[in-house]
């Protein structure tokens, strides 16, 4: 039988989470029905208990249960608690089994969430979604730039389990050259989880797209949505425009992506607010009013994930957290520090954004 931990939510109308059931000795009937022992659990599940369900007015009690597949959602849960009961227990179509000791099981309709196997979600009864946030590798800026990107990717590969998705928020190349993107693409090919990349002011959009794919994308992973936007302003060949801007098409893409209502993180290169760093503030995202208007129409944006500033920082914009992922190739220091304005001696830094039951925590790492 497939085994795993299950959390029973108190309201069967609540939006279900996403996870997979996995284990040794999976029931062959279930394997045949879903095709394999690994299957995402999405939707309402029906728990068949052993008769240990508490009576009305009593605290929930633990019970051993199987979870009946519904809408091709197949899993078995080993332990759980009953938080909500419906008046159809003792149904005629549920037969006693080996776990019930010959006693006809009671039935409770629940919404269940199994622990996700692909993300950093190993705690009992907790659904976690993890974004590994990398930024500003600037391949071609220094001989060490590819080495520093490789160091970050090796760090993620060593995570057990690995993040659910990787975001690289711009300035992949330093000069926007084909050879720089070829090096970056080869290094990024080692990523074994879903990943998205958006361009920065040092990138050249046509070459970026040729080697890395679309400049904007919408990716759905484990019940969450990641929207990557292009804030790069195209410049004539050999020139660069450092401040960023979101076009009407980009804002429309974001607006439509948020309409679905999924918990969403938005990635782009340029921060939309000042970070109180004289080197970076003049070249932040310009004309940010349009972004603020889109965010004000929706309430499902968890955070804006940005790069550009080469520093680990957090602030807010339009009531939404803004998290700066740090810099891979270098660190831009604050004005008060007795350090070079662009410090290549500092180690690469990355961020791990952990969304746990709609609660966001960010861990920055120097590696």
Image (spheres, rainbow, N blue to C red):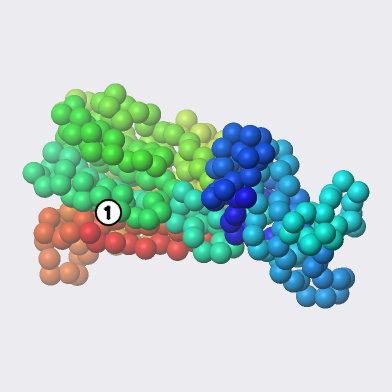
Q: Position of residue 7 (x, y in %)?
A: 65, 60
Can residue 140 be seen?
yes
In the rendered view, tell whether residue 351 sits above or below residue 235. Answer: below
| Foreground residue among 187 and 210 | 187
Q: Residue at x 73, y 42 (%)?
A: 70
Locate residue 346 relative to residue 196 in the image: left or right: left
| Foreground residue among 74 and 301 | 74
| Foreground residue among 1 and 287 | 1
Q: Residue at x 67, y 39 (%)?
A: 29
Q: Position of residue 196 (x, y in %)?
A: 38, 39
Tell me which corner region of the image, top left, top right, bottom left or bottom right, holds residue 47: bottom right
Q: Residue at x 48, y 36 (%)?
A: 218
Q: Among all residues in the image, which is located at the extreme left? A: 143
Figure quadrant of the C terminus:
bottom left
Q: Position of residue 360 (x, y in %)?
A: 49, 61
* Label 1 Cα crowd, 10 Å radius (few <14 / some 14-19 / many 20+): some
Tell me which corner region of the image, top left, top right, bottom left or bottom right, holds residue 238: top left
Q: Among all residues in the image, which is located at the extreme bottom? A: 58
Q: Position of residue 192 (x, y in %)?
A: 36, 40
Can residue 176 be seen?
no
In the rendered view, tell whether residue 294 sits above or below residue 89. Answer: above
Please count the marks in the image.
1
In the rendered view, tell whether residue 337 sits above or below residue 234. Answer: below
Q: Secondary structure at mark 1?
A: helix
Q: Residue at x 25, y 33 (%)?
A: 185
Locate residue 53 relative to residue 274 in the image: left or right: right
| Foreground residue among 194 and 358 | 194
Residue occupied by mark 1: 155
Tell me which corner region of the image, top left, top right, bottom left or bottom right, holds residue 84: bottom right
């Amino acid at each position: 039988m497939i085994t795993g931990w299950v959390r029973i939510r108190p309201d069967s109308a609540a939006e279900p989470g996403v996870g997979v059931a996995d284990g040794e000795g999976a029931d062959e009937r279930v394997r045949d029905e879903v095709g394999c022992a690994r299957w995402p659990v999405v939707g309402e599940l029906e728990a068949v208990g052993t008769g240990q369900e508490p009576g009305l007015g009593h605290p929930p009690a633990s019970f051993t249960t199987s979870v009946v597949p519904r809408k091709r959602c197949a899993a078995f849960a080993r332990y759980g608690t009953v938080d909500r009961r419906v008046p159809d227990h003792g149904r005629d179509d549920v037969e006693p089994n080996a776990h019930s000791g010959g006693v006809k099981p009671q039935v409770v309709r629940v919404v269940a969430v199994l622990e996700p196997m692909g993300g950093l979600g190993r705690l009992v009864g907790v659904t976690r979604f993890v974004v590994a946030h990398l930024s500003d590798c600037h391949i071609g800026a220094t001989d060490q730039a590819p080495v520093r990107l490789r160091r970050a990717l090796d760090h993620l590969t060593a995570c057990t389990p690995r993040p659910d998705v990787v975001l690289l928020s711009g300035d992949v190349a330093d000069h926007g050259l084909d050879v720089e993107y070829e090096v970056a693409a080869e290094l990024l090919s080692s990523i074994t989880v879903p990943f998205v990349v958006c361009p920065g002011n040092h990138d050249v959009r046509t070459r970026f797209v040729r080697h890395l794919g679309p400049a904007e994308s919408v990716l759905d992973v484990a019940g969450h949505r990641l929207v990557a936007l292009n804030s790069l302003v195209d410049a004539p060949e050999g020139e660069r425009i450092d401040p960023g801007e979101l076009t009407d098409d980009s804002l429309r893409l974001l607006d439509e992506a948020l309409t679905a209502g999924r918990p969403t993180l938005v990635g782009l290169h340029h921060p939309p607010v000042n970070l109180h760093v004289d080197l970076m503030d003049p070249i932040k995202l310009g004309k940010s009013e349009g972004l603020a208007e889109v965010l004000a129409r929706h309430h499902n944006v968890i955070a804006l994930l940005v790069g550009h500033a080469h520093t680990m920082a957090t602030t807010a914009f339009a009531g939404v957290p803004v998290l700066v992922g740090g810099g891979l190739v270098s660190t831009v220091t604050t004005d008060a520090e007795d350090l070079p304005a662009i410090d290549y001696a500092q180690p690469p830094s990355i961020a791990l954004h952990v969304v746990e039951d709609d609660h966001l925590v960010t861990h920055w790492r120097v590696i």
